[in-house]
Image: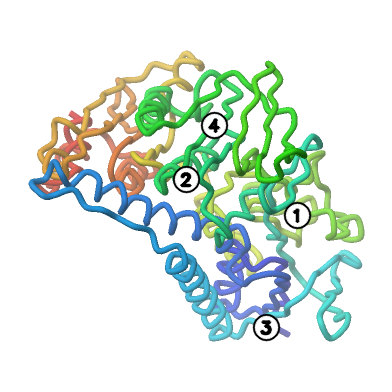
Amino acid sequence: MAHRFVIIGGGPAGNQAATYAARLGAKVTMVEREIVGGAAHLLDCIPSKTMIATGGAISFGQRIGGMGLTDASTTVDEDALVRRIGSIRDHMQDDTTQLLQSQGVDIIRGTARFTGPHSVEVDTADGVQQLEFDSALIATGTRPRIPEWCEPDHERILTTRDCYPPKVFPKKVTVIGSGVTGVEFVHMFASFGAEVTLVVSRQHVLPGKDPEAAAILEDDFLSRGVRLLKGARATSIERDPADPENVVVKCDDGRVVESTHAVLAIGSVPNTEMLNLEAAGVISDEGGYIPINHHCVTNQPHIYAAGDVSGKLPLSSVASVQGRKVAEHAMGLHTVEHRHLDYDKAASAIFTEPEIADVGLAEAEAFALGRKIRVTKVPFATTPKALINNDPRGFVKIVSDPATGVVLGGSIVGQHAAELISVIALAVTANLTVTDIVESLLVHPALAEALSQAAE
């Protein structure tokens, strides 16, 4: 009898696990209650990057005066942009669904919960369906975190998911949260001409990221008229009773911000409370995340967790690789030693302008650990391609071992940083040295030349 594999959640982790397990001979059933492709992926990530791409086109139009052209006047067709977001989302969902079906994956639309260590029941539009399994994967993702001191009305007090597709393009907006999601929202709204205030609980944006990268981003925000409220924590967000179109954000230091809209971007919570994990004997932590080992196995040897719900890096790229590893392990391919996922070597990017990307050991982290490192940094202003593009902002920074030259990490700020970081990520994963990068014959003129210069 074929291995029965039930997957709860159709995001990147679930999709990869389903297709790989099916190819390996499993009888795969996927349960998805919202959207095949993943709610966080197709309702948050892809729409936001689509809007950011449009904002980038606007910014480029504003820069062309320095390229021997007349300044372009760019007018946003809001209806067309909303249709574009929907079209991309639908296209990706259709592609994912067709791929799963082509592999023989049975997709059930509904909400699943465990009824035992080897069984789930699914609430569907046609009633309750019972499923038995040999292995199961929990890949239910997360949703925006809502603090006790705020109740979104989804009209003017918004969660991140309320923003796509945009019901309205705010003219004056306050963003609460200065992490990755928060700064991307600031960049996006500012690109569309909004007056933006960012509430920053620390003394700089992007805590935990390279301070030099954060400083460049702050300078860009300030040059675009963004107001930064540093060292302030929001304590309440309310509609003004005297003016329903006005939203009032109060901070713990007494400062008050008024705007037409406010967006909460203060993290996520896992979707595990409805799964009835106790029936399966699966343990979750105090935050609701499900602890896993290096095989993505929970405390139950036949039940896995992957993606954001596992409490690891909340990145689609990480979730996808986790899903593949889960399928291989569930089908018995990892009975011998193999390469485990090293989350410390995962590349990540922030799609602001300029883009920010990093991978591996950070400079500040190395100093905190007392580890000896070599740090080399090259500004893009020294590369011909950046000057040709009329955008010399940012730098490439490489962190390496001074004794061996092995690349330990790096960060990039500037145009196409999300693409360029792949070179450093490969070096970190494969234990390549700075000499390996220097001796690679890269294209000229290209922004990638800064990588070779930094490696020297």
Which of the two discs, 1 and 4, sits closer to the camera?
4
Q: Is residue 117 visible to the viewer in this orientation of the structure?
A: yes
Q: Nearer the viewer, mark 3 or mark 2?
A: 2
Quadrant of the image occupied by residue 27: bottom right
Label number found at residue 106: 3
> Which is more toward the observer, 331 or 385?
385
Q: Amino acid at mark 1?
A: Asn
Please determine whether, in this image, residue 334 is positioned above or below residue 452.
Answer: below
Q: CA distance from mark 3 to mark 1?
A: 22 Å
Contact between labelled residues 1 and 2, with CB atoms less than 8 Å apart: no
Label 1, on which residue?
Answer: 271
The image quadrant that residue 394 belongs to is top left
Mark-to-mark CA distance, 2 and 1:
28 Å
Q: Is residue 57 left or right of residue 145?
A: left
Tell me residue 346's x, y (percent): 47, 44
Cα distance between the residues tagged 1 and 4: 28 Å
Q: Give the structural element (helix, strand or loop) at label 1.
A: loop
Q: Which residue is mark 4?
A: 198
User: Which disc, if any, is residue 189?
Assistant: 2
Could you say whether the residue bearing mark 4 is in a helix, strand or loop?
strand
Is residue 72 found left or right of 318 in the rendered image?
Answer: left
Tell me how far mark 2 sits from mark 4, CA to CA. Answer: 11 Å
Q: Alpha carbon of mark 3 to alpha carbon of mark 4: how far? A: 45 Å
Question: Is the residue marked by circle 2 packed among few (<14), some (14-19), or many (20+) residues within 10 Å?
Answer: many
Q: Quadrant of the C terminus?
A: top left
